[in-house]
Amino acid sequence: MQRYFKTKSWLSKSGFLHFSMKKVANWGVLIFTLLYVSCCSDREENKFLEIEKSDKVFNLKGEKFYFPEIINPLFINAVGDYLIISENRRNDPKYPLIRILKKSPLGYHSSKGKSGFGPFEIPDATLVEPGKNDSTFTVYSGMAKTFTDFSLTDTSLLGIDQYKQPEGMYEVFNMFHATDSTILGIKSIDENRLVEISLKDGEKLAGYGNWEKIPDTDHLIDYTDPIVNYHLGEINKGWFRGNREVGLFVKASIYRDRLEIFDYNDKEFTIVEGPRLELPKFEIVPSGANSVVIFDIQNKYGHRDVYIDDKYIYDLYGGFNEEEIQKTNEVAKTIYILTHSGDVVGKLNLDISIRGVVVDLNLQKIYGITTDEDPGIAVFELPSEFL
Amino acid sequence: MSIYKQNHPLVLTEQVFFQHSQASYRLQKKTPPLYFYSHRIRVFFSLNFHHNQNKFIMKNKIKVFGLGLGVFAMSFGFFSINPSFAQEDQDDPGMGEPHHICCQSNSSGCTDLGGGYWPTDESRYAVTCTR
């Protein structure tokens, strides 16, 4: 660039500013490059698509195990050496809501969860987490707003302990214990993504992560609406899972392709977008005195479940819409493996469609609920690269 | 014949206006504003146009500038992802009123404003999600 100034080539013989085509072109390239770098260099790569190009994609062949006790399962969780299967609440109430299987050798263990709203009963088994000791587990019912402890060793369908969430936190509908005296949950309407609430009095102790505006949707979302936080919560809705031991709580959005990884230890979120970066089609329509978010029925579901262990986050991904699921019974056949910091390090293509995922690193197994007419448990070998 | 070599009425009018304005400023002993000099500058520019070589260079400059501007504008189209989520009109003649599944049976459940939660639901068609 110095030569432009030294040779005074800016000036023509008449003393007027003079540009040659070459210089104009050079400056043009320079300005364009600077503009491009300034506007586009901060665009993050799509981590889910990048993994496709790597050698960390594996095709897994699974094996289905059928259990006549399991009728219409929806969720699968793990507590110690057991798989906890949550049945559909629409089943005949005479059937228990929870089936317990031993992982190794895989076999039926017992049933729990008498359906109902009475003492130690549950109307649904929304979330499952390890209990106060190795022989118990805790079930959160989003419908009854109760925590119920069950024993892994007795034969009773009823719980052994039950407590209702305080009225002050009634709007919380998904929650896990963050500590012995606090829960971490999602409220139906709140300025924060997650709230931490005291179990003693139901007071909100802290809120983590504020809802941000969604780009290019100002024509769809009225941010001055008093219930806009409810709308944002619905748009970002998904599966909430936690691992208290490692301090990670993850929400895997079902409508929008987004994973929100919350590290309770440092109280920070890691947001992972993808594989689709665009929002699903939706509209906000009046409903009584309020309004609700309605998604286009043609939208394909995104994340279907997530499991967190000491090493990785296993993200079960769908990609099928309601019509496709009802026609083909295929819900999800892809698992993305992410580090706790949100880097996608692997992709597993499954030959059996599953809903819900659990992984056992020691047994090197992946478990899921099959989605065929007679659902059972699909078992896959975890590739040694991820052990 | 070029328009600049004619006694074009517009040019004449402009020159006369310019001279009169300059004179009025001189009478008032004020410094004329900068735009008064724009006429002289333009004349100075136009002198360079009389040379064929300069004409050729200027034409090419304009071409390069135009081409660069076009490429620059197109590049924004290529590199700026600007997804539009405008809601499609779902009214389809012959298909009746648009209906939505309230709580889609394979979704993660339904939540109302007050925190009421249903983990699953049957395939139920409704206009809105009210219960």
Image: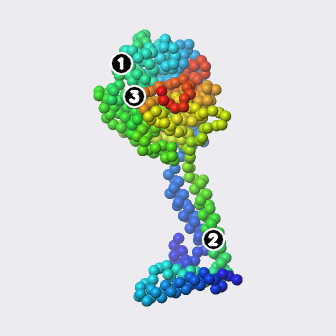
A274 left or right of A191 in image: right
Label 1, label 3: how far apart the Cα atoms are: 15 Å
User: Residue pushed farthest top?
Assistant: A155
Residue on which the image places disc 2: B62
Quarter of the image for residue B47 reads bottom right
User: Residue pushed farthest right?
Assistant: B1
Residue A295 in view = yes
- Is disc 3 surrounded by few (<14), some (14 to 19) or many (20+) residues within 10 Å? many
The chain letter for the residue carrying disc 2 is B
Label 2, label 3: how far apart the Cα atoms are: 66 Å
Q: Amino acid at mark 2?
A: Ile
**Residue A312 placement (x, y as % from top left):** 48, 33
Q: Is residue A38 above or below residue A178?
A: below
Q: Is residue A23 above or below residue B128?
A: below
In what element is the residue under mark 1?
Answer: strand
- Which numbered disc, 1 or 3, marks the residue that appears first in the sequence? 1
Q: Residues at badges 2 and 3 in contact (C-beta under 8 Å)? A: no
**Residue B2 placement (x, y as % from top left):** 68, 82
Residue at 50% of width from left, 57% of height from top? A38
- Is disc 1 surrounded by few (<14), some (14 to 19) or many (20+) residues within 10 Å? some
In what element is the residue under mark 2?
Answer: helix
Residue on which the image places disc 1: A162
In what element is the residue under mark 3?
Answer: strand
Residue on which the image places disc 3: A176
Q: Which of these two is toward me, A114 or B102?
A: B102
Q: Residues at badges 1 and 3 in contact (C-beta under 8 Å)? A: no
Whether discs 1 and 2 lie on one chain: the answer is no
